[in-house]
Amino acid sequence: MEADLFGPCALGPYRLGNRMVMAPMTRNRAGLGLAPQEMNVLYYAQRASAGLIVTEAAQVSGQGIGYPNTPGIHTEEQVEGWRLVTDAVHAHGGLIFCQLFHGGRISHPSLQPGEELPVAPSAVKPEGEVMTYQGLKPFVTPRALQTGEVAGVVEQFRRGARCALRAGFDGVELHAANGYLPCQFLEDGANRRTDRYGGPVQNRVRFVLEVAEALVEVWGADRVGVHISPFNPFNSMHDSDPRALYTHLAGQLNRLGLCYVSAVEIDPGSLRNHGAPNHVTRRVREIFEGAYITNGGYDREKGLAVLARGEADLVSYGRLFLANPDLPERFRTNAALNEPDPETFYGGDEHGYTDYPFLTPAA
């Protein structure tokens, strides 16, 4: 059974060393110009033993920024910074996909070019506050995109995909989860449109499909994945019928022949992670013909178990990879784990970022 987690496997055109994926994790440590800097290079290189690394969310435009000090993938400076990251990961034998991101309404005018309003499918204000360079501020009511503007946002993702290709990534992942712009188009709690991008599920999936098609044009289908999060209420998200929505989306993604779908597993009863797919993502797994990556509170034993049951092809780990750069070796030998330090998750310097110890200090 352990070979399922620790042995090699195929993903698209690649042969992964194991089935452990390093999940995308925002760390708010980008350098000048919101480009990766030296400590970001070391951080990713340290974790190159993952079967696959998916980067922290990289905004595809200035409009797409959601949080301070997050890296972009739309300027030459950012491409050059990411090239240093990909070269380092490849030098250590790893594979790395870039997660393409647009925050939509989960932003603030102080973060936007010209201090304009964030854009969204509809002018629906999320609850709560957003972090800015001046501290926490209440969310604002976003500006609803006009129908004619949507193609321009799709083009932002296409340009981001081209930048990721030039930066030396092995593939890209569309971030359509956790309440950001593509997710806002999907779920009717945020999407109140009456045009071709709103209303029935066939319309609400249109934006995600158009973006996915743009990514496939740049990368080819076997190097493109999509990240989803049915039932995740983060960022004031909800849908009236997530089963109908996400199963329809899975079927439509099959037409494109994508490499994988990655899903955040939230139990709809308790809205907590339990290390097992929920009833909607189980159905997505059955419908989607590519690889299925599960993420949601998994440890070593739960990861082995979900693979043994055939409920996933790969298992994505977040905080455990954050605190254990050599997580595959620790799991393989059943060694003790470093404890993550929540105080250093977001922003700061190398402390809590690149100074977590390895099992073998020479590593």
Image: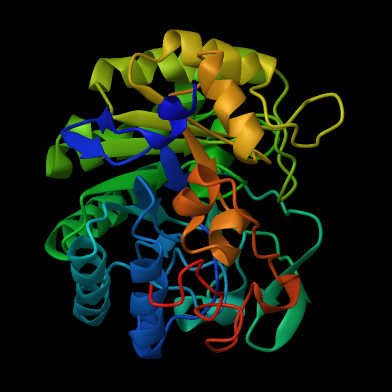
Q: Is residue 117 left or right of residue 262?
A: right
Residue 52 in sight in this render: yes
Along the line of sight, the residue nearer the viewer: 317 or 145: 317
Q: How many labels were placed on the picture?
A: 0
User: Which quarter of the figure is the C terminus placed in?
Assistant: bottom left
Q: Indicate the quadrant where residue 74 lies.
A: bottom left
Residue 191 in sight in this render: no
Along the line of sight, the residue nearer the viewer: 304 or 298: 304
Q: Is residue 287 left or right of residue 61?
A: right
Q: Indicate the quadrant where residue 210 lies.
A: top left
On the image, the x and y values in percent for residue 111 come to 55, 78
Q: Residue furthest right?
A: 270
Q: Residue at x 20, y 50 (%)?
A: 170
Q: Residue at x 52, y 86 (%)?
A: 350
On the image, the x and y values in percent for residue 91 come to 18, 66
On the image, the x and y values in percent for residue 168 come to 16, 61
Q: Is residue 163 left or right of residue 143?
A: left
Q: Is residue 122 left or right of residue 343?
A: left
Along the line of sight, the residue nearer the viewer: 58 or 2: 2
On the image, the x and y values in percent for residue 114 come to 47, 82
User: Coloured how?
Assistant: rainbow
Task: Identify whether 222 is placed above or below 72.
Answer: above
Task: Identify whether 292 is placed above or below 89.
Answer: above
Task: Identify whether 231 is placed above or below 91.
Answer: above
Task: Identify whether 255 is placed above or below 141.
Answer: above
